[in-house]
Image (tube, grey):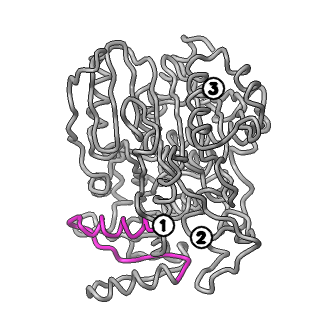
Amino acid sequence: MSQTSRRSFLKRSVGASAAVLGANSCPSPWLRAAGANDDVRLAVVGVGSRVKIGGQGRNEIRSFRQVPGVRIVALCDVDEANLGPEVESFQKRNEKVAAYSDARKLLDSKDVDAVVVTTPNHWHALVTIWACQAGKDVYVQKPASYNIFEGRKMVEAAAKYQRIVQCPNGSRAPNGHAEALDYVRQGNLGQVRMVRHVHFSPRGSIGKVSGPRPIPSTLDYNLWSGPAPILPLERENLHYDWHWQWPYGNGELGNWGIHHLDGCRMFVGGGLPRHVISIGGRFGYEDDGQTPNTLIVYYDYEPAPVLSEFRALPKDKSFLANAVHGKDSWGAVAMDTYQGIPIGKVIHCEHGSVVSTVSSHTAFDTGGKEIRKFQPTTPPLNVNFLQAVRSRRAGDLVSDVLQGHLSAALVHLGNISHRVGKTMPDREIRERIAGNRELSAAYDRFHAHLSANGVDLDTTPATLGAMLTFDPDTERFVGEFGDAANQLVSREYRAPFVVAEKV
């Protein structure tokens, strides 16, 4: 595709974004939140497990309870083992809270103004859409959607029902990212040449069960499965480890990658790429996980591409053992780094670069001298959400549902390329990507990382993802591999948990 047509697409994408924000930003007196002039009454859907990992809902409860003018009035979780203890915590504080196992019943309540959605990914869209239809505002955890189709339906529902829908992630938090983005957009470092996202952090095996495990008596597995098919439980840890199984999760791209890919997208214009290709696999152990733990994704943007690299195996395997046993949750010293960072992004420009980690954003000149460290001026995301709930202007949001959808689409594009691809010998992969210097260099690093962990790509080959062509206007794949890729744009839904074409 020519540079002219690529740039035209980006302009159209920005125009479409402005149109949606414009339609959403007008006050809607007949849909004002019931608590707009006093407390905002909040419900949390998806409390999360207290065992091992998996309590994002509890994190949000703690966070929102600290914000003045908020009352958490309802909790929902399909597992009584998660829900019960959290309800007891409220009771011990003499705070009244309603308890639900079914989000539909919660959304019928006139005592709830807004919901925080911290369910597994495959439930994000449906709860958000139902909440919009019920006249509730929504704060939905990353990634906004489980697939591309769902994300677009969320955007449509928010616009149709004039709801405030915030999609938080790390790049939108008050950490200096917004200020660094403005600095680069003003041309202070010249044109952006390439944006890199790196996440080098060990992730242990999720184990391998010998057969289906019993469903806990405290769990409504029908409700937990929701839009997904009801499948045998074939993982050791019911909660959290769904991230690494395709029917429910989006792998490392959806778990960690979304935090930085969202920021990468904004540095290259805010739209979606025309092409995507990936290289990856699940290496280092045999377990019940299905998603790749080592992955390269190349997003073909103009004027600058985005290159994402994930590595989850440490060079020193003792660190992996420590991470698994909670002794070292990151093990960064055992991992690779890129320009000194194990996790973050680097924006390469004509006259310097910006290095962004989770907590800091710094500009450097071409000689590596620090130019400026960016301080945050934006509010916390939950505070920003409540400001917009009160103002009834979606344009006040730091990360509205359209931005959440577009960034989640990057997750889905990378995963779809991988899933449509095929395993190939090392030599063949090198031959096929030889024309792309940056991708070839990334594959060299990928190879070296796996070799350091005892993985031989000749005997355990990687998957070369399909080179996919994506039409951002229709949000469908075209050309070679398009038919196979389009099968993964949506999913087959299980009634009555259906994300409908018309919301």
Q: Position of residue 490 (x, y in %)?
A: 69, 48
> Which residue is label 2 attached to?
237
Secondary-structure class at tag 1: loop
> Are the residues at dot 3 and dot 1 in contact (C-beta closer than 8 Å)?
no
Q: Is residue 472 above or below residue 250?
A: above
Residue 432: name its quadrant.
top right
Q: Is residue 433 above or below residue 147?
A: above
> Are the residues at dot 3 and dot 2 in contact (C-beta closer than 8 Å)?
no
- Residue in the picture at 45% in, 82% down: 99
Which image quarter holds the N terminus?
top right
- Circle 1 crowding by C-alpha within 10 Å: few under 14, some 14–19, many from 20: some
Question: Which sits earlier in the primary sequence, circle 3 or circle 2?
Answer: 2
Q: Is residue 70 magenta?
A: yes
Disc 1 from disc 2: Cα separation: 10 Å
Which image quarter holds the C terminus?
bottom right
Q: Position of residue 94 (x, y in %)?
A: 26, 88
Question: Which sits earlier in the primary sequence, circle 3 or circle 1?
Answer: 1
- Residue in the picture at 48% in, 66% down: 54
Secondary-structure class at tag 2: loop
Disc 3 from disc 2: Cα separation: 36 Å
Q: Amino acid at mark 3?
A: His
Disc 3 from disc 1: Cα separation: 34 Å
- Residue in the picture at 61% in, 39% down: 450
Q: Which mark is residue 275?
A: 3
> Which residue is label 1 attached to?
54
Task: Select label 1 or label 2 by which is in front.
Answer: 2
> Are the residues at dot 1 and dot 2 in contact (C-beta closer than 8 Å)?
yes
Q: Which residues are magenta?
A: 54-80
